[in-house]
Amino acid sequence: MDVNSINNNISSLNSVPQQHIDRANSTEQIDNNDPFLKLSINEYNKKRDELSESLQAFNEGIGISRTAQNGLEKQQEFLQNIQEKLTDIKSNDNTDYDKNSHKNDINLELLKFREEAFQTKYKNENLIAIDDYEENLSVNISTKEAYFSIDKPNTPDVASQLAQVVSTTDFNNTDALDETINKVESSINQIQNLTDQFTDLGNKLESSARVSIQEQVDLSNQNRANKTINFGNEVNDFSKANIQANVGYLAASQANIVQEQSVRLLS
């Protein structure tokens, strides 16, 4: 092989066709239909849609949590009213006074408690009550990033149990009245525990929503930064760097071939 042919090949590599250089320098020829950009645009749109869907799910979950909390807090108020009534009844020392006469007032508060359970809804779905035909026994919030679930409480059972206690208890009996007050206190703690569970769910959802919002901001900023890139110059620089690197490899390769040929001639 003629050594001069190596120089000729290197020269031909250095003279890149002008039409390719012109295409690389022209940013006007790169548009949204170019396969080089189409994939990036599709990925951006897909990621943006996923984040939007997640954020919508987080918002609904937070709405569910707050609605349930409000309903449970109102139920606590009804139970606290009952507790105060029973405490007042107990403090009345009039022996001629029939303390059982206040049972209707207490049952009225329990009725309000029960009504609140079925009025606490989100998009027509019960949140703190379960009817006989309901199949969904939990509250679920699902996103691409996380999954949240909480068992749906059936607070009307609390009212039913207390109503049974009130109907069978003789309020004129101090010990029996104390036992009823203790059961009301236990019910208040039970409702408070349910409130804490929904509060914790809401806090987790808000924390995850903030992460999702930050991802949307970062994605938007990245998309804005991509729009400022001169893709013509980037392609041109990339092409030149690869050509120069390959020229060196080709020269070294062909030099080895010449050396082999010389050794064969001498042998």
Image (cartoon, rainbow, N blue to C red):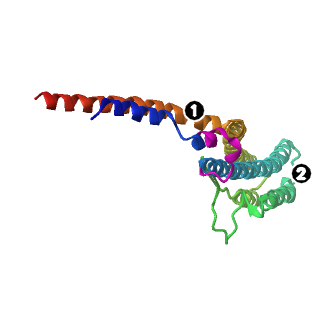
* 174 sits left or right of 102 in the view: left
As rendered, which of 144 and 221 lies closer to the eye? Answer: 221
In the displayed structure, would residue 200 be above or below residue 35? Answer: above
Q: Residue at x 35, y 34 (%)?
A: 5
The mark nearer the N terminus, 2 or 1, is 2
List x then y, in percent, for residue 151.
Answer: 62, 54
Q: Residue at x 75, y 51 (%)?
A: 68
Main SS category, magenta section:
helix
Residue ID for mark 1? 237
| Quadrant in which residue 252 is drawn | top left
* 72 sits left or right of 258 in the view: right
Secondary element at tag 2: loop
Distance, label 2 to label 1, CA atoms, is 102 Å
Q: Amino acid at mark 2?
A: Asp
Secondary element at tag 1: helix
Residue ID for mark 2? 96
Name the image quarter holding the C terminus.
Answer: top left
Numbered badge on residue 76:
none
As rendered, which of 35 and 258 lies closer to the eye? Answer: 258
List x then y, in percent, for residue 194.
Answer: 68, 47
Q: Residue at x 26, y 29 (%)?
A: 256
